[in-house]
Structure formats: C-alpha cells, structure tokens
Image: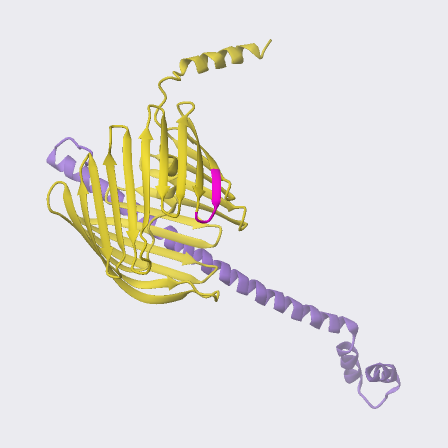
Amino acid sequence: MASANKRLALPSNNNEGILARVSSTISQSPIVHKGQQAASDVAYVAKRLLKSTGKAAWIAGTTFLILVVPLIIEMDREQQLTEHEMQNASLLGTPSLPAK
Amino acid sequence: MESIPPTIHEIMEIKRIDYFNLPCPVPYEEIHREAMMSLKPDLFEGFRFDFIKGLNQKFHLTHSLSMGPVEVPSQSSETLKIPTSNYEFGANFLDPQLMLSGRILTDGRLNTRVSYNLTTNLVLKANAQFSGESPVPQGMANFDYKGKDYRTQIQLGNGDLIGANYIQSVTPHLSLGAEVFWVGQQRVSGAGFAARYNTDKMVATGQVASTGLVALSYVQKVSEKTSLASDFMYNYMSRDVTASVGYDYILRQSRIRGKIDSNGCAAAFLEEQLSMGINMILSAEIDHKKKDYKFGFGLTVG
C-alpha cells in the first residue's frame, strides 16, 4: 500500500533529481520484479540440474569403472598374449599351435 | 494356393526330426544354469583364501579362510555389518560311482553331501546340515532318474517335504517340465512349470510356480568364449521385479563376469590365473540405491 502511494506521488515530487526518479521507477516496475523472480527460479533449477547431473555422472562413472575398465584391461592382456605367442612362433619357426 | 508350398515344406521339416531320438534335457533344477553362471557369480566381501590339497587321485582336502564384514539383518534400512572371520575344513572323495563331501566350520556348522550311482541311470543324492543352534539336522534326499529323453527326480526332506519333478524333451531344442511339492510342516503345497529352448547360439528359459514366481532368462552366446545374459524375475506375492543384464568372458588366463540390475546394483567378478595353480579373485559390487559398496579379494591355491 505504501509503495503504491509512493509511486503515485512520484511525478509530483520535485525534490528528487530526474535520475533518481528514473531509477526508482525502474526498480519498482513489475518487469524488474518479474525478472528477479525468473532469475532466482533459473538459478534454483540450474542448481538442481547440476546436482542431479553430478549424481548421474557419479553413478555412470563408478559403474563404468567396475564393469568396463577391468574388461578392457583383460582384453588388452589377452591380445598381448596372443601377439607374443605369434611372435614366438614366427621366431622359432614352429607352426603356431593354439594354446591348450 | 500360395499357402500350400510352405505347409508342405513344414511337414517335410517336421518329418525330418526323429522324435524317438531326442537329446536328454538338463535337470529341472538346472534349467537356468547358463544364466545363473553368468549373472550370479559368488560375490563376497573382504578376504578369502582357499587351499586345495590333493592327497591322491580320489581324495582331496580343502582349507578355506574368510575374513571380512558380514551383513546382519536389522530392522533399520541401513545395512549393519559385523566383521567376522571363519575357517572351513573340507574333505572330498570323488569316484565315478560315489562322491562324498563334508565340510565343517569353526562355528560348529557341518555340511555333508553324498552322491551315489545306484544304477547307471538312477542316482541317489543326499545332503545334511548340522548347525550348533538346532539339534535336528536339516536333511534332504533326492532320487534322480535319467531316461533317454527325459529326467525325473523325487525329493524327500525333513519337515515333511516331498517333491517331484519331470522334464521331457519335446523337440530337439525345446524341453518342457513340471514340478509339484508339498511341505507338511507348514502345510504348503505348490506346482510349477518350466520351458527351455536351447540352440548352439542361445538359451531361453521360462519358469512359473504357484508360489507367485515368474522367472525368465535369455543367454546369447556371441562366440565360443563370450556370452551375454539377461534375466527377469517377478514375484507376484511380494510384487518385486528385478531384471538384470550381464556379460561373461572366458579368456585364456582369466574369466570376467559383470552385471547390472534394475535395483541399481552393478557387480563384477574377475578370476585370473597368476601362475599354475594360483588363482586370484577380485569381486566388486556397488549398490547405488542402498549406498552399499562391497569389494573382495581372494586367492585360490591348489
């Protein structure tokens, strides 16, 4: 109620400078108010989004570490072993027999 | 007119199958074995050491030591873990005709197992568990009969348990089975049906039981040493549903199994041969929902 009165009284108030009058009109305008609200909403959503993406990244990362990393290491070792055997076979000149 | 050629072809196809020479199906209890092997590795937490000592061709002793936290059932949602250690001594006698096995734990539990071939087709299997708490041992005896294209089993156990199951090959790939059981002590009875379809490349199974259990599984053999498995479990009574997918790689010096299920639980199990007779086991399980992390390290010698 008080702010409404003030806003109504503004144009007749000659004591304040033009700059102050403009700035107070802007700061009290509904557009600015809405803008502030929107900004805080965006910040809240962004925070939540960041938090949930962080959680998802954690879950995906740990799962990957458990399920995929050991598999890659083992496949690599297997390949190394095969290559090593191939090399040995070619060096010794023996026909490459499959192990076991 | 166009529908006639395929039907004739189908009849030819059916005629070619010799229904009097169907393969013997897998036992009823083991219809899910491929999926079980890939999706249910023996996960553990803490440290494990197993030593197998063969005294001669037929007789061997096992010593196993385990240390680590053990989950204790509690009312609260948080899991309660108590560190424990255990030593288990086992003796096994293996012979084509007779198999005897016994293991005893430091807390007084004793497990015994007997398998005896009465005839070439009839096998008697019995097991008993003695625990320190209850004076009455838990026992069970099975009579397994293996026919040309069917298998049947009769189970007798204490607590007035009587059960029977039968599985029959219907086509070279498909086998169907049924079971009935009756527990006199709790006055519960039930029946179940199962189907299994297997080819060289895949195995699909389904099982329904009157206890409200529905279990489906599918295993695809990608190559000789690689398979992908998935299963689905639904309990009508408790309304829980679980589905899981996993892989199983058998490499030259190691075997690795991994799975992830719909409860947010990822697990991996790695067995690696370090040198002749020494195997290392690494087990990992992450439960994202319960925030429960289990890691285990084990060694097997012998």
Q: Which residues are magenta?
A: B185-191
For the point 40% across and 17% down, the residue is B19
x then y, percent, for residue B115:
25, 39
Location of the N terminus of chain B by quadrant is top right
Left or right? Give the position of B280 relative to B288: left
Q: Is residue B108 above or below residue B207?
A: below
x then y, percent, for residue B261:
45, 50
Left or right? Give the position of A39 relative to B52: right
Task: Choose between B199 and A42: the one closer to the eye.
Answer: B199
Task: Choose between B118 and A2: the one closer to the eye.
Answer: B118
Task: Choose between B74 and B66: the one closer to the eye.
Answer: B74
For the point 27% across and 64% down, the residue is B85
x then y, percent, for residue A68:
37, 50
> Residue at the bottom extreme?
A15
> Residue at the top extreme?
B1
Left or right? Give the position of A44 relative to B238: right
| Residue B302 visible in the shown view | no
| Residue B141 visible in the shown view | yes
Q: Quadrant of residue A24?
A: bottom right
Task: Choose between B14 and A43: the one closer to the eye.
Answer: B14
Left or right? Give the position of B76 relative to B84: right
Chain B palette colour: yellow
Q: Is residue B87 above or below residue B213?
A: below
Within the magenta stretch, is there residue B49?
A: no
Q: Is residue B28 above or below residue A66?
A: above
Q: How many numbered dots are placed on residues in this image?
A: 0
Chain A palette colour: purple
For the point 39% across and 48% down, the residue is B159
The figure's colour scheme reads by chain
x then y, percent, for residue B120:
24, 28
